[in-house]
Image (cartoon, grey):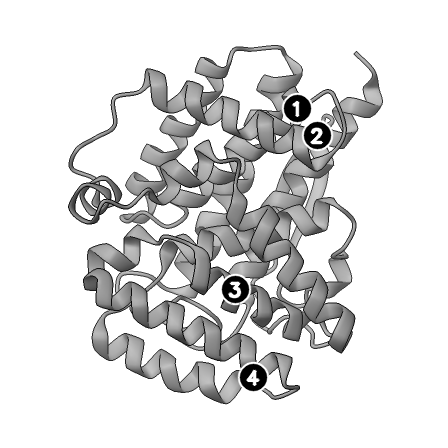
């Protein structure tokens, strides 16, 4: 196997872990943990989410080792399940559970995709998702499963089986269009957030607040995008709706997971550079025995307004 392929999949894993960090530090994010507060998650904190990032990066590093070793998809699925249990046991709550699944699926799909191009990658994602959900009996007690059953929603299952349309058809174009207009990473990030709020079928939102909650985040996503398109500053609006979301107990974990995945994909594609994260609030990575390990620098500061 060409050693350049090993290096490429390691870089991809690093980008995905950094994407999760960029999502965490983007501020403000209504109903979600950021540098200001814990949103609608009294069981979470910034420091707890940062500890979760360490576990996430270790997980992606272990997946890379498994891929390079030629192990089976079943083995890689087991790594994910084991990490999910470890995350819950260590932190007491499901911090990056959705992102574990999304990033792992994307990483394995990228490794399996021998032909370059977005279409082939999307087909690889969809094929893996069908394999995963076809062989696995989903736990009926999960909030996502309950929300999908109650509201007839597809959620993360449909998203994966369709090859991540929220990533490729919505988030990436929204980011690129806004960045072309503004030249500002943070403005483009909020545009991406607004688009995902409109398009992700968020079962966390449905579990918390039902269809009215989902309608609310979609309406607010449209407003965010309109503010940005007109050249305005959406931060005041985001701060205001964060207070409302906290009062309503409204959150959007699925949007957050897809936002982090989109950041990671953009970083892996060379669109986002490491300098896009403020130097005092970034995930730094080093190489140990040829595989990615991580160090989180815990000084808190937002993503830089300029790239």
Label 2 close to label 1 by CB (< 8 Å): yes
Question: Mark 2 or mark 4: which comes first in sequence?
Answer: 2
Give the secondary structure at mark 1: helix
Give the secondary structure at mark 3: helix
C-alpha span from label 1 to label 4: 39 Å
Quarter of the image where one finds residue 219: bottom left
Residue 195: which numbered mark, if any?
A: 3
Q: Is 109 located above or below residue 15 in the figure?
A: above
Instruction: Please identify, in this view, whether the residue under mark 2 or under mark 1 is nearer the observer.
Output: 1
Residue plotted at (43% across, 18% down): 131
C-alpha span from label 4 to label 3: 12 Å
Question: Mark 3 or mark 1: which comes first in sequence?
Answer: 1
Residue at which label 4 appears: 227
Which of these two is toward me, 202 or 23? 202
Residue plotted at (45% across, 81% down): 238
C-alpha span from label 2 to label 1: 7 Å
Residue 111: which numbered mark, if any?
A: 1
Residue at which label 2 appears: 9
């Amino acid at each position: 196997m060409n050693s350049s392929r090993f290096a490429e999949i390691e870089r991809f894993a690093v980008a995905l872990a950094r994407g999760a960090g960029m999502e965490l530090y983007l501020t403000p994010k209504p109903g979600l943990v950021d540098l200001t507060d814990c949103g609608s998650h009294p069981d979470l904190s910034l420091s707890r989410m940062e500890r979760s990032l360490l576990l996430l990066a270790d997980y992606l590093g272990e997946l890379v080792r498994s891929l390079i070793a030629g192990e089976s998809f079943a083995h890689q699925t087991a790594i994910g399940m084991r990490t999910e249990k470890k995350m819950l046991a260590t932190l007491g709550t499901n911090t990056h559970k959705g992102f574990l699944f999304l990033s792992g699926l994307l990483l394995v799909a990228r490794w399996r995709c021998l032909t370059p191009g977005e279409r082939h990658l999307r087909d690889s994602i969809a094929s893996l998702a069908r394999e995963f959900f076809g062989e696995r009996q989903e736990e009926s007690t999960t909030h996502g499963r309950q929300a999908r059953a109650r509201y007839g929603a597809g959620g993360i299952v449909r998203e994966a089986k369709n090859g991540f349309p929220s990533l490729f058809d919505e988030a990436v174009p929204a980011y690129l269009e806004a960045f072309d207009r503004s030249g500002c990473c943070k403005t483009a990030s909020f545009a991406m957030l607004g688009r995902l709020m409109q398009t992700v079928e968020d079962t966390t939102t449905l579990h918390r607040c039902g269809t009215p909650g989902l309608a609310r985040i979609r309406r607010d996503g449209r407003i965010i995008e309109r503010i940005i398109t007109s050249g305005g500053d959406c931060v005041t609006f985001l701060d205001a709706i964060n207070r409302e979301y906290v009062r309503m107990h409204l959150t959007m974990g699925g949007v957050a997971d897809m936002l982090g995945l989109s950041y990671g994909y953009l970083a892996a594609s060379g669109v986002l550079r490491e300098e896009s994260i403020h130097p005092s609030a970034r995930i730094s990575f080093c190489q140990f025995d040829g595989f990615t390990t991580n160090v989180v620098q815990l000084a808190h500061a937002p993503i830089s307004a300029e790239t």
